[in-house]
Image (cartoon, rainbow, N blue to C red):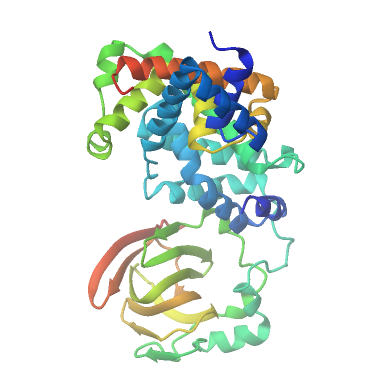
Amino acid sequence: MIDERHLELIHGEIDGENSAEASRELHQALDSSTECRALYEDLRRVSDLLQTAKPVEPPRQLRARIVDALVDALPQSQPRPAPGRVGRGWLSMLTPGYAGAFAMGLLVAFGAVSMQRWAGDADLDISQLAGTMTQHEAASPRLLIDLDEISGSVVIRDQDPLLMVEFDLNSTGIVDVVVTFDGADARFNGLAQRQGEALAVTAEGSRVLIKNQGEQQLALFLSNPRNGAMSLDLGFYIDGQLIHEAGLDYVGQ
Amino acid sequence: MRDADSELVTQCRSGNRRAFETLVQRYERPIFNAAYRMVDSLDDARDVTQTVFLKAFEKLDSFDPHYRFYSWIYRIALNESINLLNGRKHVTSISEEQASDWKTPEENLGTSQVCDRVQDALKSISSEYRSVIILKHFLGCSYSDISQILQVEEKTVKSRLFTARQRLREALLDSELI
């Protein structure tokens, strides 16, 4: 029969909770009692077997599901920005000075930006947007990317009459992100960057190519005058090889 | 890392959704694993994990920052798992024997025979004892942590762990792993 004290020492040792002194006391008991030693070895084996049960990986989409569900819950539970106060870094760019430049279809980006079709194409009164940019944030479709090569998020924010596609990405090397959008009246309307150094952003037709390296936060602005539904297809490529595909849908209003 | 949780919680409370996303990123894996060990189903573990984070977000205002965030969210995770198990008792119509053999292809492919037997042994002990084993062996909690999570005294934690381990030992003996 093993006494209470020795039982406590055995479990404490397995749990890593024994002091050095308690540990010494236990090992003296183990040396003098075969019963103590047998129990200790059995329980050690139980602990070792539990360690062999490898962690299970959560499904890839679980985090995105949680965040999406959280976004749905936001209007009831999260403080909203004060009226007229622009809450996000992107949006603070849309002060009247920026808005004027933006309305001319100006691309705001660092690095090489190639525009083949839309330069000077903006036809929107962007000045109306300042202060209204967070209205529909709660329903923003969101995609989370969690790959070894690239991670982060892509979010579509409805900034009537624009859609802002916000990229917050971090890649170890150069990853080409090809964004293809479809929507009856959708057109590329501009680009803004908050962080990072865009190697190149190229827009042609309904396709935009972003070369991502390191941490980048940038936004594509798509005109969507009728607030219609729009789908985004995203392809992630390294050296021309597709490593990941995903889609994101805006349901329209 | 855990010291930074309180800062993230403060940011969440002030409306910073990104801070909550960071907490999700940090605790998604341990909570999913704890839930899986409790409910023995990947699908149910996924649902439990999602519910845990949503409840945590909803109840964030009631979180006492003097306590550790992980203790608080692990408690929610165990409670949600136990709620699911309690609900499952009423709808189970197949025999226990059938249930133990009924595994998804993912489970069959993803776990070794030894891991399966360990999981079966865990499943064979009550949820009260399973909880302490999971907290100690899978989540690495101390007696003090477990005491806070289960809201019982440390001596009760020790007592439950002793009994839980003995029961687990018997189950593993039956499955010839010891």
Q: Position of residue B31 (x, y in %)?
A: 50, 39
Residue A77 visible in image: yes
B127 and B28: which one is in front? B127
Question: Across the whole image, how many numbered discs are drawn on residues?
Answer: 0
Q: Is residue A67 left or right of residue A251?
A: right
Q: Is residue B80 left or right of residue A80?
A: left
B77 and B67: which one is in front? B67
State the image quarter where residue A52 is shown.
Answer: top left
| B153 w.r.t. B105: above or below | above
State the image quarter where residue A91 is shown.
Answer: bottom right
Q: Residue at x 46, y 57 (%)?
A: A141
Residue B126 visible in image: no
Q: Is residue A49 left or right of residue B23?
A: left
Q: Residue at x 59, y 19 (%)?
A: A6
Q: Position of residue A3 (x, y in %)?
A: 60, 12
Q: Position of residue A174 (x, y in %)?
A: 36, 78
B58 and B152: which one is in front? B152
Q: Position of residue B87 (x, y in %)?
A: 46, 18
Seen as rendered, the residue at the extreme top is: A1
Q: Residue at x 49, y 74 (%)?
A: A215
State the image quarter where residue A19 is shown.
Answer: top right
Q: Residue at x 41, y 56 (%)?
A: A251
| B16 w.r.t. A105: above or below | above
Q: Is residue A17 left or right of residue B25?
A: right
| A92 w.r.t. B166: above or below | below
A108 and B3: which one is in front? B3
